[in-house]
Amino acid sequence: MPLRFVHALFLLGFSLLLLACEGAAVTTPTPVTLTIAGSTSMAPVLKALTDAYSRRHPNVVFDLRGGGSTLGEAAIRAGRYDIVASTLFPPDPEAGRPAPPGDEALVRTPIGLDGLAIIVHPTNEVTALSLVQLRDIFSGKVLNWQALGSNAGEIVLVSREDGSGARDLFETRVMGEERVSLTAVVMPTSQDVVDYVAGNPAAIGYVSRAHAAAWMTDAQMTTNAAQEEAPIKVLEVEGRRPTRDAIAAQQYVLTQPLYLITRGAPTGRVRQFIDFVLSPAGQAIVAQYHAPIR
């Protein structure tokens, strides 16, 4: 075979290889942005889940927004956002929770269970409260910690904003027909409640378990020495703390669901993300903050 012909074949093969490489570069996955709004109580677990998913799929980025469960569900019914995170119980007319217009289009995917942690300053001597005592405190019937065996002084109430899933559960399970006192300091997120209580020895508030998990173990609170270093203290309610085991067994009275909500059945990247959340890897992440559903 003539050398010139061999050289021509080599150049042709090299050119085809370059074209193949250029073609491969063109097929880079298109960047995708998914917007998740709603529950601020679920913010820590959503941040961890979306970070883990983006490491596996670098072309998928997430826009995480708050707003609360109630506003989030209203937005997803109106077709805004890709996913909404919510801790609200689903509509149940027999239980006094009528379905808003458009709710029939929503698909709620449970991903775990949460518990409301009742928190005080670590110097407060109180370690446990009943639901009745909580109701009396937040309604303003009990004004001083001395009535409960503590020297923390006049009680400072810390509540969540209207529309919060945490507030909805607290008012339903704890307050009943009574109202939270107008003297309560209202905070927009669970983290804000933690920060306020940590800086006020007389304060008491309620937050998602995720914001107190760092100072809890599955079975019990951390040691006394570790608890003294913690910025907050989690109280027993009706004899139990919101550990994963107690929440999973429905033994803690202030338990609420964790949902990812879509308008219609999830498809495409939204479906892939929700599938990841329900996978063993995703549920292991959920378990760092809440009780997993699987």
Image: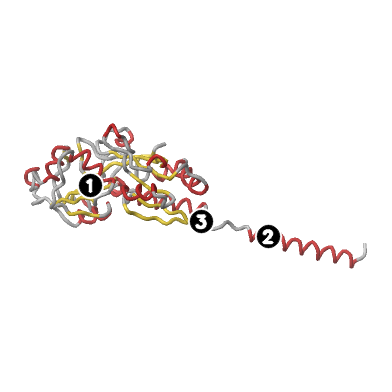
CA gap between label 1 and label 3 equals: 36 Å
**Which circle, 2 or 3, is nearer the viewer?**
3
Comes first in the chain, label 2 or label 3: 2
Residue depicted at x 37% and y 47%: 85
**Which circle, 1 or 3, is nearer the viewer?**
3
Residue 8 spot, x, y in % from top left = 85, 66
The disc label shown at residue 153, or none: none
CA gap between label 2 and label 3 equals: 21 Å
> Mark 3 and mark 1 in contact (Cβ < 8 Å)?
no
| Dot 3 amino acid type | Val
Image quarter of the N terminus? bottom right
Q: Is residue 259 above or below residue 18?
A: above
Q: Residues within 10 Å of mark 1 (few under 14, many from 20)?
A: many
Residue that protrudes farthest toward the bottom in the picture: 4
| Front in this rendered view, residue 25 or 261 | 261
Q: Quadrant of residue 141?
A: top left
Q: Residues within 10 Å of mark 2 (few under 14, many from 20)?
A: few
Q: Which residue is mark 3?
A: 32
Residue 3 spot, x, y in % from top left = 90, 66
CA gap between label 1 and label 2 equals: 56 Å
Element carrying mark 2: helix
Residue 270 spot, x, y in % from top left = 48, 48
The disc label shown at residue 23, or none: 2
Q: Is residue 194 above or below residue 131?
A: below
Q: Is residue 200 above or below residue 110?
A: below
Residue depicted at x 22% and y 39%: 172
* Left or right of residue 65, residue 13 in this image: right
Element carrying mark 3: strand
| Dot 1 amino acid type | Tyr
Q: Which residue is mark 1?
A: 206
Element carrying mark 1: strand
Residue that protrudes farthest toward the right in the picture: 1
